[in-house]
Image (tube, helix red, strand yellow):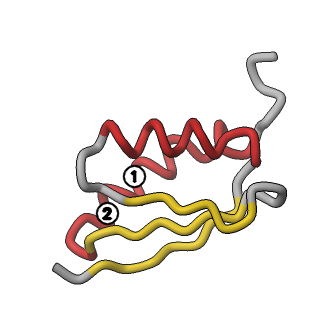
Amino acid sequence: MRCEPLYLRISPARISLLRFMLEGYDGLAVLTTLDRKTGLVRLLFPAARYYELMALLRAMSEELQNANQNK
């Protein structure tokens, strides 16, 4: 199985939310935090699940950017 990397910059306060969501989609992607202060993360995902991952990230995009939401 070929895995691809995807680098994202998200709100640092939302890193744990993204990690939690990815755990619910067994095998969709593995998140590694590269810089927690700036919110830089790397996702490794199976190339065959690219569209599924993109759909999830699109659905979560606003939530991943807004650190002050729900406060």
Q: Which quadrant would residue 67 be assigned to in this image? A: top right
Give the left or right position of residue 4, taking residue 67 as reference. left
Q: Which quadrant would residue 63 be assigned to in this image? A: top right
For disc 1, the marked residue is 55
Q: Which quadrant would residue 69 be assigned to in this image? A: top right
The C terminus - image quarter: top right
Q: Residues within 10 Å of mark 1 (few under 14, many from 20)?
A: few
Look at label 2 and name its amino acid: Tyr
For disc 2, the marked residue is 51
Q: Residues within 10 Å of mark 2 (few under 14, many from 20)?
A: few
Circles 2 and 1 in contact, beta carbons < 8 Å: yes
* Residue drawn 55% across the image and 68% down it: 42
Give the percent coordinates (x, y) of residue 32: 54, 62
**26 shown above or below 43:** above
**43 shown above or below 21:** below
Look at label 1 and name its amino acid: Ala
